[in-house]
Image (cartoon, helix red, strand yellow):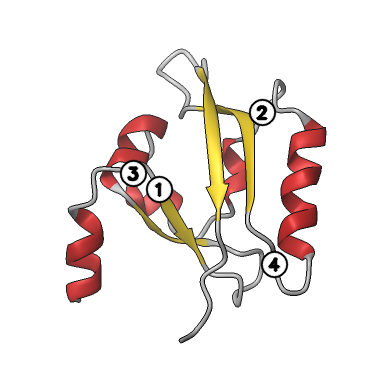
Amino acid sequence: SSLLTALSRVQDCFCLSDPNLPDCPIVYASPSFLKLTGYSSEEVVGRNCRFLQGPGTDPAAVAQLRQALAAVPPKPVTVTLLNYRKADAEGRQQPFWNSLHISPLRDA
């Protein structure tokens, strides 16, 4: 579609999730998101973003994120999480700081 073509040209690192589907799965991930995380589109689409979390991810920051998204209506939120890239051949996952800026999109 023309929307997907336009989104693929955006240089920013982002993904889109669908809150109307169970577990709010990713429905689109930008090329920059895929490059940063090391995952392919096939590995990302259909999963909740929590798969990027790991042992160093701050539970308080995750709780802040969940609280904003659970509000009715959902509220915009900005949090910084320690996330993890896809494991390398030795099974090591490299951490990265992820500044999340989440804004619910509403039907017009």
Lower sequence index among marks 4 and 1: 1
Q: Nearer the viewer, mark 4 or mark 3?
A: 4
Quadrant where the N terminus lies? bottom left
| Helix, strand or loop for disc 4 | loop
Q: Nearer the viewer, residue 98 or 44?
A: 98
- Distance (Cα) linking label 4 and label 3: 29 Å
Q: For mark 2, what is the residue? A: 54
Q: What amino acid is found at the position of numbered circle 4 in the picture? A: Pro
Lower sequence index among marks 4 and 3: 3
Lower sequence index among marks 2 and 1: 1
| Helix, strand or loop for disc 2 | loop
- Distance (Cα) linking label 3 and label 1: 14 Å
Q: For mark 3, what is the residue? A: 40
Q: Are the residues flagged by discs 4 and 2 in contact, CB closer than 8 Å?
A: no
Q: For mark 4, what is the residue? A: 74
Which of the 4 image quarters holds residue 21? bottom right
Q: Nearer the viewer, mark 4 or mark 2?
A: 4
Q: For mark 1, what is the residue? A: 14
| Up/down of 74 relative to 68, above or below | below
Q: What amino acid is found at the position of numbered circle 3 in the picture? A: Ser
